[in-house]
Image (spheres, rainbow, N blue to C red):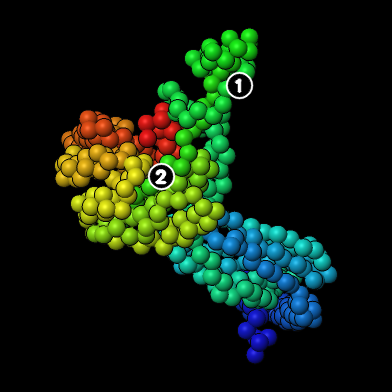
Amino acid sequence: MKFIKSLYLNNFFFYVLLGIIGLFVCAFIFPNMYNAVWLLVLGLATFLAIDILLLYLVRTGLEAERITPEKLSNGDLNTIKINLRNHYNFPILIKIIDEIPFQFQVRDFKILKTVNAATQKEISYELRPTERGEYLFGALNIYVSSPLKLISRRFIFDKNQMVPTYPSYIQLRKYDLIAFSNNLFQYGIKKIRRIGHTMEFEQIKEYVQGDDLRTLNWKATAKKNSLMVNQFQDEKSQSVYMAIDKGRVMQMPFDGLALLDYAINSALVLSNVILKKQDKAGLFSFSKKVENRVFAERRGSQMQKILETLYNIKTDFFESDYSRLYVDIKKNINQRSLIILYTNFETMDGLNRQLPYLKGIAKSHLLVVVFFSNTELNSIINKKTNTIQEVYDKVIAEKFMFEKRLIVNELKKYGIHSVLTQPENLTLDAINKYLEIKSRGIL
């Protein structure tokens, strides 16, 4: 029974069989062909038996193993590897059908490869998850054919392998070194404008070329009879909270990923940068109520705590309650802190409804509102118009884009910092804003 279930006839067998049937039809017209065609039938049966023996005489003809990451990185390309070991003494043609998780909605997954005799081969493919949670891989099905290509033998490996999908830890590694420098242009990313410096004094040292002449210490220079400068360092142990709006406005998808997941990925990377800069990182999410709270601390386990909290943020479709957010911040965050609010405002009316609460938060804390530019409107704005309807669509799209800039100016009037960014640039722009605030010493 097991033998029958693993045996499959290839298309090549049916093509040959179809040709033989055609020859039988011709034999009615040319009777002399009849015996010759039966010889072909006998030959096909012989080769079929040989092919079965070739594939089934070796009990373990093929070994395979699917190697997945310990966890998948949400929104990024994750490499899945398949290790193959061919124990046959002839080259084999393989067809891999991996039962990948249903979340990817891929129903035509297939890889065709040739593996040389008695060799090992590694095959890889990439998956890009767009939501957090558990992903269940089914069976790894591999169909093996000999050089005769008449039949295939199916091997099944690695059934029901579960892999969790976490916020983008690949970006976390990518931007790890940024934490050690305020000069992002050194990494080929983006240059920030440095205005002044923080005023936490570190030491007096000898002047070297490149030091800021404005920091010359004239008294020390006179005593040492050589140029001496004051050296400053960034202020440390400042509290930074990331407030993530998980309400209805954050469910809008861009490139398959919801705005909420872009914010979660950014918060993870930014938390790492904050901790590397010796500040305290914390976060919470809010919608109808404030949840997923991690108090701002600087511990060795803080990153793992933040990662697990971000993984467990559950989305909803309620309208976010900013009054509840204001009361919660006033009650639980007593020290002046930097609060980076990930949310989205599409219109001035939407902002004006929440502006009193944002102004209230900004009185006690340094508030940065991070919201998104609707990049999908660019295709409408840049499209050449040919009809009246297209003109109307273009005007409305330009109005929405203009309102985004008005929101920035409105927030600026009340001393609220803002970051208007495209979803794919969110992480860089958030890091850039944090480092700018650090370099200016305005917290």
Q: Position of residue 379 (x, y in %)?
A: 33, 38
Tag in front: 1 or 2: 1
- Residue sitting at x 51%, y 52%: 299
Q: Amino acid at mark 1?
A: Lys
Q: Is residue 202 above or below residue 273?
A: above
- Residue sitting at x 67%, y 68%: 65
In the displayed structure image, the side of residue 302 where residue 338 appears, left or right: left
Quarter occupied by the C terminus: top left
Question: According to the image, label 1 marks what residue?
Answer: 205
Q: Position of residue 377 (x, y in %)?
A: 30, 39
Nearer to the camera, 62 or 39: 62
Element marked by disc 2: strand
> How far separated are the C-alphas under marks 1 and 2?
30 Å
Nearer to the camera, 29 or 368: 368
Question: According to the image, label 2 marks what residue?
Answer: 239
- Residue sitting at x 74%, y 60%: 121
Q: Amino acid at mark 2?
A: Ser
Give the crowd class for mark 2: few <14, some 14-19, many >=20 residues within 10 Å.
many
Q: Is residue 40 above or below residue 66?
A: below
Nearer to the camera, 298 or 397: 298
Visible residue check, residue 179: yes
Visible residue check, residue 93: no
- Residue sitting at x 60%, y 12%: 223
In the displayed structure image, the side of residue 94 where residue 53 appears, left or right: right
Q: Position of residue 315 (x, y in %)?
A: 33, 60
Taking the view exactly as shown, the residue that stands out farthest to the bottom is: 1
Give the crowd class for mark 1: few <14, some 14-19, many >=20 residues within 10 Å.
some
Q: Earlier in the sequence, mark 1 or mark 2?
A: 1
Taking the view exactly as shown, the residue that stands out farthest to the front is: 223
Q: Is residue 432 above or below residue 88?
A: above
Q: Is residue 383 above or below residue 85?
A: above
* Residue 375 placement: quadrant: top left
